[in-house]
Amino acid sequence: MILREHYLSKIRGFYDSDLIKIIVGIRRCGKSIILEQIRDELKKKTDKILYLNLEDYDLEEKIKDARSLLDYINEHKKEGRNYIFLDEVQNINDWAKACRSLRLEHSLFITGSNSKLLSREFTKELSGRYVSFRIKPFVYKEIKEYAKELNKEVSIEDYLTYGGFPAMFNYNTKEEQKEYLINLNETIIFNDLINRYRIRKVDIFKRIANFIFRSNARIYSVSSIHKFLNNQDITCSVNTIMKYLSYLEEAYAINSISPYDTKIKRELLYYKKIYDEDVSFNTIRASVDSIDVTHNLENIVYNELIYMSYELYVYTNKNGNEVDFFAYKDNKKYYIQVCYTLVDEKTREREFKPFKELDNDCGKIIITYNDPINWSNVNVRHLNLKEFLLLEDL
């Protein structure tokens, strides 16, 4: 497995902190691998390391609750301050009590399944005692590196279609990869969330989830989703829709960005643009001949910008023309449009139009899939997707 230095570099400064280091993210994004890579780094300077995979059957038999976990650690730790790693900590009853105790004497790292260790839980249980790091599926630069390690070729088209879940690349055929993604989807979206939250309106939840995943890179309000359900003669309250959307976000399955204009009151009704954590969630719901490349393209750009650590908003200029992203980081600001191609003159006019009413203090970028002509001008930089995906920063 490749070294995920992008994440390690953010965590490294906290190795010796008394804060609990929590590695979070969607299932199968590589959290346990990150934990192993941190452990391997620390092994170079100390042997005071204790790593427990709490899904291991032998440990499950010995460790059931916080008390037995603390007893086991006290029995097996080295003298003095240790580095303690607890993988899948949610399997322990009262895990938070044990973590609060361990951090007082040791440097503690934990991961947990998104089905049982969600953002609001560690916020509540460990308030003020933790720092969290979110891990995401591979971006394209990581895919290229891992593919080289596996002696494989992975195209941009593959990334646009099947996304970046690391384990998917261990399979050799598209059929095997899609089967893996379908099974992963069932576990993440339906089994985890339906069972965890004891969702009784299972069919409605599935319909909403399917609707959201197929409709990535679009702006929605709760009222628009409510209207969609009403058109299918499905009765569901606005509060229930908001609750289901929050479940999907807490499980790191979807992400949302708000309008840049804070005066827009529609955001009180979940007026946001929604993106899938991985574009495979869209693809596995599409028929073979209707892969949604256009919206997956924008979703990929979103994922890459988040990887670059940009804060993102949807921007609407004074004339009501929408810009896909207003990206901000370290006093650097960019307006970014995404479209499939600029070959058609009307499309070019439509995509460049929102830039005309914007000041030139911010960078202006338009990203297309694979145009043969560079349409950059004095104010706007045009990038094909491949060029953008290989950038370290804008």
Image: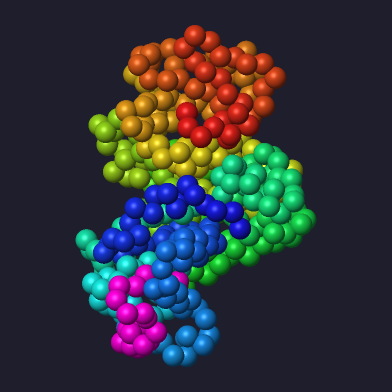
Q: Residue 98 placed where, x, y %?
A: 30, 78
The figure's colour scheme reads: rainbow
Rendered residue at 67%/39% (across/down)? 156
Of 359 and 270, nearer the camera is 359
Task: Single out the residue that lies furthest toward the bottom.
Answer: 61
Query: In the rendered structure, which segment of residues is drawn in magenta?
Result: 67-89
Q: Residue 368 placed where, x, y %?
A: 60, 26
Q: Is residue 119 above or below residue 54?
A: above
Q: Residue 182 placed where, x, y %?
A: 64, 61
Of 320 and 204, nearer the camera is 320
Q: Is residue 129 above or below residue 67?
A: above
Task: Single out the residue that lies furthest toward the front.
Answer: 45
**Residue 65 seen in this snapshot:** no
Q: Residue 22 placed where, x, y %?
A: 37, 62
Q: Is residue 151 above or below residue 384?
A: below
Q: Does residue 76 show up magenta in the picture?
A: yes
Q: Does residue 331 show up magenta in the picture?
A: no
Rendered residue at 56%/45% (across/down)? 139
Rendered residue at 36%/31% (across/down)? 328
Location of residue 357 by image quarter: top left
**Residue 104 seen in this snapshot:** yes
Q: Is residue 227 left or right of residue 295?
A: left
